[in-house]
Amino acid sequence: MSKKRKRNEDAEQGGQQHPGPKRVVLCDKDSPGTTTSSAGKGQRTQDIVASKNSNKSIAPANYGQNVNRSTRDKERSGPAAPTSLRERAKALYHTRKQLPIFPHADEIRKHLQRNDVTLLVGETGSGKSTQVPQFLVDEKWAWPRTVKVHSTALKKKANSQTKSADGDNGPAQKETVVKEITVGGCIAITQPRRVAAVSLARRVADEMGTPLGNSSPASKVGYSVRFDSSTSPNTRVKFLTEGMLLQEMLTDPWLTKYSAVVVDEVHERGVNVDLILGFLRNMVSGKKEGRGGLPLKVVVMSATADMESLLGFFGEGLNSGISDKDGSSGMDKGKPNNDQASDEVSSPSSQKVSVCHIKGRQYPVKVIYSPEPVHDFVDAALQTIFRIHMKEPLPGDILVFLTGQETVESLEALVNEYAVGMDPALPKVQVLPLFAALPQAAQQRVFTPAPPRTRKIILSTNIAETSVTVSGVRYVVDCGKAKMKQFRARLGLDSLLVKPISKSAAIQRKGRAGREAPGQCYRLYTEKDYLALQEANTPEILRCDLSQAILNMKARGVDDIVSFPFLTRPSREALEKALLQLFSIQALDEMGKISEIGEKIAKLPLNAQLGRVLLASAEYGPNCLRNVIDIISCLSVENIFLNTTSEEKKEEAEKARRDLYRREGDHLTMLATVRAYASENSDRKAWASRHLVSHRAMQAVMDVRKQLVTQCRQAKLLPNDKDTNGANGNHAISSEENPVSILKSFLTGFASNTARLFPDGSYKTIVGNQTVAIHPSSVLFGRKVEAIMYNEYVFTNRSYARGVSAVQMDWVGEALGEG
């Protein structure tokens, strides 16, 4: 590992050198005007379904009255919330009233009183994410109610005379059971990203004058994201990621705890939001047996004005209420009809879909394009940041859009380095990164005002495009690119590519500079390049591996995938490839039904491949499972090692990490790093600095590690004994390390992510026969081994395998033969 390596890589992959700022000239051009589309055309109008008289409201008499909220808190949860919370809420009320959406509160309430589905269009920053749940939470239809539901149970004959020869009490009989359940009482708001769910929950808790999450029994606002949930028994408003709502559907297919589900940021069109929309359409268009006839209100919110497809999507579902010949409304095991496969169409539904347009508040934003194509956007962003800082007075923070954790951290280091030599007369700079894998505490720093005479410089991925609104931003620097998944079904390759953004995304990024005052947007690409961008992003469901989506659907009772109501239907080829992939990891049986292994994977907070790896490692024993948990925790962040740019830095990094590197490859190197970090009892931050390891990333790794251990204990995969308890609630470090069992466990989920060495020295994928090179960041870079297994396939200036380990071909054969 000590020999000098030549690593040829672009800035996105952390391999580009930045010797110093280069001269880039930017020209000014006024921002093009924007147009607002008209609202309300093509709405479908039908009457709301009347609630059954037998439904009993269990809300207290003053449940819907804001003036008596503190009284209710005291009655239900003991002492009222601290005065400081109420005072803060009172102070924030003035800010709430200034939001563009606030005057529309009554209009939105009336839409939901009349309709089960409302589509709401509001520009980013209009206040829809924080205000809509507060508008709805005290509505009468949002009160919890006790209802009677019918369920089918199996009952064996008790008569001894009917016993069979083997002593059994005879065949099981179906029995209809009537039980009372509580339905509703909480408003769910889905978000595509963790940081948005948590930050919005904090803000709404402040505005409602209530503690957040599980910090107090009196809390009315909570959140649920992967590896972190904070709610109380009295939670009335719950922010959660789309994946967590899908997870809740496993145990509560009718979403009985919710009166309404608000689907936010639908314009991002991730796979999970498309699944949620399909499930919700079936839920609102059926007979609602699982909810005792009570409707589930649905609010779909978007920052763009294109609602025609959603209007037709929900309108079609409501106009074709599905019922089977026996009148069971497609019920299977107490679940909503998710296949839409019926023989008879009921009479027209008495519901309708309404559309509500909220005009945003947008100050003028001046757009400055690059006069020439930019080949190094990290360096161009560095120059632009300091040009703004030296030229423009305070106040006015800078938001920079980059492509991923690596470019964020690379630019962060450069800005801090250049800031040291800055003129002391200039204001100070506070550099704050923002990306999905960042620990929660670090993410929240972005929303804290900067100290006096200090300008915040926020370096973000597209997470800040629409999901979160950061106050104080008046300058946006847009690199014009983003990381996107691209699945090539024919080759079976799921690639991670850095691609140009869409015009819609560019407009959203520009708009971040004009929320509070006139602003400027510096586009690090030419106007010609902007005009060549596609209008909108391609929905993720059309460009990614659908294995995880199909497993989610199968686990929630969808057997006929082709008939599921997709907002945008994926190709049959992509669906078939995903089914084969799930079959290869034993998540589906030969009939396409979900297997016992598949059901276990679906309950884990991991994708299908990593879930299969986790289960496979448990078969080798608890020590192997603990080691695999550590590796998977590292894979949950983009990179645990600090980026090195110059050859000198690369040699320094290799020397510092020499005791961490493992000849087997990156997976065992990750394990060694977690072990060493977890064993450091004095100063972990100093240890990370010495080894050029990201302390921030390792904090996130330890959080994920702790949650995975808890999940595995709950699933009985790990023993719940004192031997496995370590510092901070983490599991003890396993003294046994068996590389073969660890790598074979990973092959169980990643057998299709393998490549073999050819005589010419190149690697070709075993599935698809594509040439691939080991990524320069890998500890195996420059080495030749019989075969490799990798976690992801990325493309920059060539095709790379990242997260690489050496494996044997007979192991690969065993793994591929298991299907």
Image (spheres, rainbow, N blue to C red):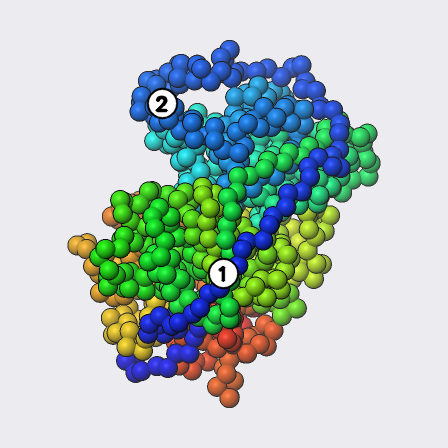
Looking at the picture, which amino acid does disc 1 mark? Asp
Q: Residue at x 34, y 23 (%)?
A: 87
Q: Is residue 777 above or below residue 400?
A: below
Q: Quadrant of the C terminus?
A: bottom right
* Rendering quarter of residue 292: top right
Q: Is residue 409 left or right of residue 563?
A: left
Residue at mark 2: 86
User: Is residue 128 rendered to the left or right of residue 408?
Assistant: right
- Residue at left 34%, top 67%? 643
| Residue sitting at x 77%, y 34% | 319
765 vs 794, nearest the viewer:
794
Q: Position of residue 482 (x, y in %)?
A: 51, 60
690 on left or right of 745: left
Across and down, in percent, residue 233 comes to 43, 26
Q: Earlier in the sequence, mark 2 or mark 1?
A: 1
Q: Secondary structure at mark 1?
A: strand
Q: Are marks 2 and 1 in contact (CB under 8 Å)?
A: no
| Mark 2 Cα-neighbour bin, 10 Å: few <14, some 14–19, many ≥20 | some
Q: Secondary structure at mark 2?
A: helix
Quarter placement of the N terminus: bottom left
Q: Which mark is residue 669?
A: none
Residue pointed to by mark 1: 28
Q: In this view of the protein, which residue sits in the foreground, 506 or 77? A: 506
Q: At label 2, which amino acid type do we have?
A: Arg
At a point 31% along the width and 45% down the height, the residue shown is 450
Q: Sort mark 1 into few (<14), some (14-19) or many (20+) by Cα contacts within 10 Å.
A: few
The foreground one among 496 and 395 is 395
Return the x and y of residue 207 as percentages of the image width and height. 41, 29
Work out whether residue 789 can be spotted.
no
- Establish if 658 lies above or below 633: below
| Marks 2 and 1, how far apart at CA | 47 Å
Q: Nearer the viewer, mark 2 or mark 1?
A: 1
